[in-house]
Image (cartoon, rainbow, N blue to C red):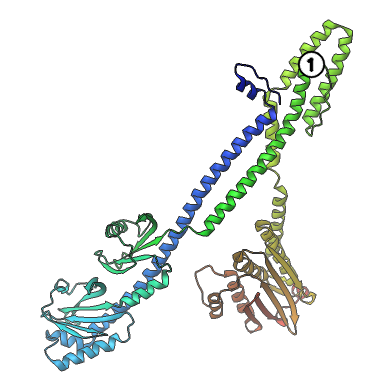
Amino acid sequence: MQLSITKNGEDLKIMLNLKLSLKISFLLSIIIFFSIFAYLMIYIRHYQQYEIETVGQENIATLHSIDTSLITVFENADNYSKLILADSVVQDQMKSGNIVSDFNKQQVLISRIYSVMQFSESIDTAWLIDRNGQKLTVGEHADSYSENTTEYDWLKDKYGRVQLLTEKREGQNYSVLVRPFNDLNTFESRGVIGVQIDNQKIKSLISESVISEKDGIIILNENNDVIFKEGDLSPADSIMQTASELETSDGELLRLENIDEKPFFLSGIINYEKGWKIIRYSPVIKTDSFQKILQFNIILIIALGILIIGISVTIANILTRPVQALLDRMKNVEHGELTKISERTYLSEFRVLFDGYNKMVDEIKRLIQEAVLRQKRIRIVEMNEMQELMKPHFLYNTLETLEALILTENMRDSAKLVEALGDFYRKSVSGGREFLSISEEIQIARDYADILKIRFGETFKFDVRLDEACAKYNIPKLTIQPLVENSFQHGIRQRKQYGYIQVCVEKIQDKIHICVRDNGKGIPKEVMDEISSCKTYSEKRSLGLRGTIQRLSLLYEDAFSYEILNSDMSEIHIYLESDVLGEYELWKN
């Protein structure tokens, strides 16, 4: 670089006299590093938001699972409560108005209640209150009797409905389903009947859905009384605020909240039909995967930044070196030196410019020899032309052209993908035919594997072994491809390691044997049970595999059989009797 330093404005002149390539490189470096920093901040924010939403939706799904289990438990208890109410002995005793007047009848009454309770896994205790306020309690551990019970008098209404209430005993809350006891014939109020829900049953249901020991679960009834609580983190003010928000929400609530200066997910749902609310506190845990992804992105971005800066400096040199060479020659002209440009350039525009300049230099030298005056006029014209040629917009247009060329570098992969898709759909449509030869099916599977490799990269190896004796046999269209898709989606892709998928077709005696195997995670046992039981499920699990097996079973009945094996390799075996398939040429004719 050339530095022109004077006493006044030294720094400004140093900056102005830097080479053009360094100016462009410096400017590009600032832009690139700023863009990388902005991208990293946006990525971190969006990834954290995504992680929060994902965990939040998982929490909501867990609460809905608990809600479904609670509905089952409480409806079971409610049904057994109705059975006790409908018992003829219980009706007669309650109709008498004095359920404890006769010891023998009392024992019969207790026996009848026990006979109903023993079939329920949800009920821990049942009690009756007659018109005189006498309460008879029947439980697994002890039976008891009390007088002048008035706490449930407000329920003694023949139009009263079942209520989910809370009873507090020995410092613990218990869930109780309470309903008016009405005569089955006259519908007159005879008292009150209640059944207590087994807290251990509720706790076991929640334990099946909640994994972390740091989670807190609170269940409130419609009066916001606590009917179940698990965990120590449950501030009363926060619970009441959450309950109020749930009552005015669309049924779900999810937010972040600090408890003891630690972040927690607060999620809740409300069951408008039953009236209860389920609230969950779960700690926000920064997963190792986020830290690893963040570190990987930082390293990747820094590496890309260095690479881009290196490329930018190279491009800047390619663009500015010819310009700088031309400027140097022009500065030599100021000192009376006319020299040609021998600088090599990769851009045709600069070559044309240099050729013109060199020709002009030759012409100037020739004219100098003819006349000094004419030489002066030619030099004036030459300087004017150089100034016009070096206007900045020429450089900007060249950079825009280069940008357009860079943006079209992926055309090769795009063309390969379009070709593979075209082959796949052309063979899949197959002129409206419902049956294809096995060789055509194999080709469809190959096209599908090619598409996967373009989309996801070389993440697996696809191998085909076809017995030529089987090639012409016809099978239903798209039989093999769904099996390959199942192996990739539920095996190779889930494993996130380099995988292997093999399709093998051979003839064993009088059967065509099709086998698709992979080294993935294997097919879950519950999916295998669903397929073997021929049940229909709404969940989108292994629909291609299940649909293929069901379709072949419907078409070929006893001539079709299959086997699914999970060991070191996950294998799907399909057996079709060859005499029901027919060969392609026979079918074609």
Q: Is residue 42 above or below residue 532?
A: above
Question: Residue 306: horizontal and vertical position, in percent?
Answer: 65, 43
Q: Quadrant of residue 459?
A: bottom right
Q: Above or below — where is 396 with respect to 273?
A: above
The answer to which of 507 and 44 lies nearer the viewer is 44
- Which residue in the protein does label 1 denote? 333
Q: Is residue 267 left or right of residue 469?
A: left
Which residue is at the front of the view, 478 or 305?
A: 305
Number of labels in the image equals 1
Specify the amino acid type for callout 1. Answer: Val
Q: Residue 461 location, x and y as percent? A: 71, 65
Q: Quadrant of residue 130?
A: bottom left
- Residue 449, compared with residue 504, is above or below; it is above
Does any portion of residue 70 appear in the rendered image?
A: yes
User: What residue sits 15% from the left and 73% below the top?
Assistant: 151
Q: Residue at x 54, y 46 (%)?
A: 40
Q: Is residue 434 visible?
A: no
Residue at the bottom extreme, as displayed: 104
Q: Is residue 201 left or right of residue 567?
A: left
Horizontal side of residue 333 vs 576, given as left or right: right
Query: What quarter of the picture does the N terminus occupy?
Result: top right
| x and y percentages locating residue 224 in the rendered image | 26, 63
Say which of 413 and 363 sits in front: 363
With respect to residue 298, does 234 lie above or below?
below
